[in-house]
Image: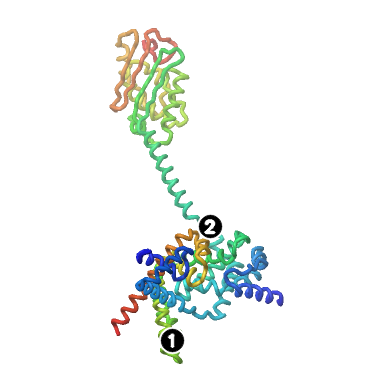
């Protein structure tokens, strides 16, 4: 055993904290090594110094006071301890992080969900009527040129738009106002009504769905509709005042006259 | 009343017989676990010296040691129902003491300042009596060296040294109390003893230069 190895073991050797084999090795080494013996003596002096420290005297009065304090606190625990539950900091931090991540996820999802809304309806009754409109959420929440109401964004707007789909499926060709959120329905309809004011047909029928507080459609729209030719499939694209909203109307030439809002109906 | 005195005497006797490996005062502990305040008071009387001494060695300050001892007994009462009679009570109590002292040191943040506060408060001057001034002066100086040397240790190293060298527990017992392996404890013991020796060497060399 060399001195380097012995020097590592000496701090433990002085209090016999080594196993038997290492104790034997160090003992053998010390027989022949004066420098290591000196180190051992220094460590022993240091340990003697450590053991030389005497405890301060604690008088009985100190102990009595301490015990009384403990017993009093046991008998009458502090109100704060009763109110405040035992707090596990690790669990609290973990829960806080989880809450932050969850909240962030909800906010991001909500933001993405309301960024673009596609509203599309298609007639399934006789598969001859189709109505589609694409609008951004910002457009939907903008106050309409017709309505003076300023609508705030709401959660679940996409669902509302889907509600529009199902409502239109039930009544193809009609712009439904039967929504779970009346305000949203009005907002969508307002945009449509704004576009419809220049539409070539269906104004009278569609106007039946216009809320009462809105102004009637422009009268010149009927004149324009009367001058239109009758193609095999009538396709009308209406660009609203807002460039983000475009309404496409497809109607067959032989549409059911009884169904409102069709080319036949506008004749 | 007489039975209480007898119980305390029994506990103290068991405690003083071997301090480390005594038969545990199971009866009193069991009564204290069942909410007997008198039994718990007896338990405190039996262990108050050891708790206070260990806390003082860990914290180096009389006031802090008293507060820590109070907190130790409060925690002991609070968690006594978790105590497993199969394990040694003193080891379980040491674990509470070390945890409380670590918390106290963390709040205080600086062990050295505590020792300075003790010095300023004049507690060290009690070691120097007028009768034997030279001997007591040496004793006080040794005390200062040791306390300052201990303040150079980390919390873990200090706990290890207090339990192993000052409380006299075995390496395995210290490892069990601190929840570490004996190898880790030996490593910490070696480091701590080396630091204490180095501090002593520096102190002595500084004293020689001054003289």
Q: Residue beneath label 1, please?
A: B136
* Other-residue count near label 2 (Cα within 10 Å), few / some / many at <14 / 14–19 / ≥20: few
- Residue drawn at point x = 60 percent, y = 61 percent: B87
Q: Is residue A185 above or below residue A198?
A: below
Q: Mark 1 belongs to which subunit?
A: B
Q: Nearer the viewer, residue A250 or B60?
A: B60
Q: Relative to residue B94, is residue A260 drawn left or right?
A: left
Q: Quadrant of the image for the C terminus of chain A?
A: top left
Comparing labels 2 and 1, the label whose residue is closer to the camera: 1
Q: Mark 2 belongs to which subunit?
A: A
Q: Nearer the viewer, residue B83 or A86?
A: B83
Q: Secondary structure at mark 2?
A: loop
- The answer to whether residue B107 of the structure is visible from this angle is no
Q: Is residue B145 above or below residue A169?
A: below
As drawn, which residue projects farthest toward the right? B2
Which disc number belongs to residue A86?
A: 2
| Percent coordinates x, y for residue A213 in the rendering | 40, 29
- Residue drawn at point x = 40 percent, y = 24 percent: A210
Query: Residue A189 sits in which quadrant?
Result: top left
| Percent coordinates x, y for residue B14 in the rendering | 63, 72
């Amino acid at each position: 055993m060399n001195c380097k190895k012995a020097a590592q073991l000496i701090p433990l050797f002085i209090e016999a904290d080594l196993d038997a084999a290492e104790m034997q090795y160090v003992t053998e080494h010390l027989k022949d090594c004066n420098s290591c013996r000196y180190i051992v003596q220094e460590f022993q002096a240091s340990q003697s110094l450590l053991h030389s420290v005497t405890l301060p005297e604690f008088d009985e009065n100190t102990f009595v006071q301490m015990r009384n304090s403990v017993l009093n606190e046991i008998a009458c625990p502090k109100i704060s301890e009763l109110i405040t539950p035992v707090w596990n900091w690790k669990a609290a931090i973990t829960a806080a992080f989880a809450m932050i991540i969850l909240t962030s996820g909800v906010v991001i999802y909500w933001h993405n969900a309301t960024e673009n809304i596609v509203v599309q309806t298609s007639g399934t009754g006789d598969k001859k009527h189709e109505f589609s409109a694409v609008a951004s959420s910002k457009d939907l929440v903008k106050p309409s040129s017709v309505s003076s109401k300023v609508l705030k964004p709401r959660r679940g707007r996409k669902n509302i738009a889907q509600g529009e789909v199902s409502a239109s499926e039930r009544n193809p060709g009609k712009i439904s106002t039967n929504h779970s959120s009346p305000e949203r329905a009005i907002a969508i309809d307002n945009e449509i009504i704004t576009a419809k004011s220049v539409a070539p047909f269906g104004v009278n029928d569609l106007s039946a769905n216009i809320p009462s507080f809105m102004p009637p459609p422009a009268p010149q729209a009927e004149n324009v509709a009367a001058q239109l030719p009758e193609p095999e499939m009538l396709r009308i694209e209406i660009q609203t005042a807002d460039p983000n909203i475009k309404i496409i109307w497809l109607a067959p030439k032989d549409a059911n006259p009884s169904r409102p809002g069709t080319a036949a109906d506008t004749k | 009343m007489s039975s209480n005195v007898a119980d305390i005497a029994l506990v103290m006797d068991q405690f003083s017989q071997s301090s480390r490996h005594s038969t545990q005062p199971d009866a009193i502990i069991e009564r204290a676990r069942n909410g007997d305040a008198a039994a718990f008071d007896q338990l405190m009387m039996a262990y108050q010296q050891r708790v206070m001494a260990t806390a003082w060695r860990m914290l180096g300050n009389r006031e802090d040691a008293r507060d820590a001892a109070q907190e130790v007994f409060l925690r002991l009462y609070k968690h006594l129902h978790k105590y497993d009679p199969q394990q040694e009570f003193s080891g379980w109590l040491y674990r509470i003491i070390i945890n409380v002292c670590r918390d106290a040191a963390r709040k205080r943040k600086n062990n050295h300042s505590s020792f300075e506060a003790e010095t300023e408060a004049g507690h060290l001057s009690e070691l120097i009596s007028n009768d034997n001034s030279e001997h007591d002066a040496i004793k006080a100086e040794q005390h200062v060296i040791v306390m300052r040397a201990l303040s150079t240790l980390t919390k873990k190293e200090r706990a290890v040294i207090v339990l192993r060298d000052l409380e006299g527990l075995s390496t395995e017992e210290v490892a069990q109390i601190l929840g570490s392996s004996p190898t880790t404890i030996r490593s910490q013991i070696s480091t701590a003893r080396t630091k204490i020796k180095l501090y002593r060497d520096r102190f002595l060399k500084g004293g020689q230069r001054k003289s």
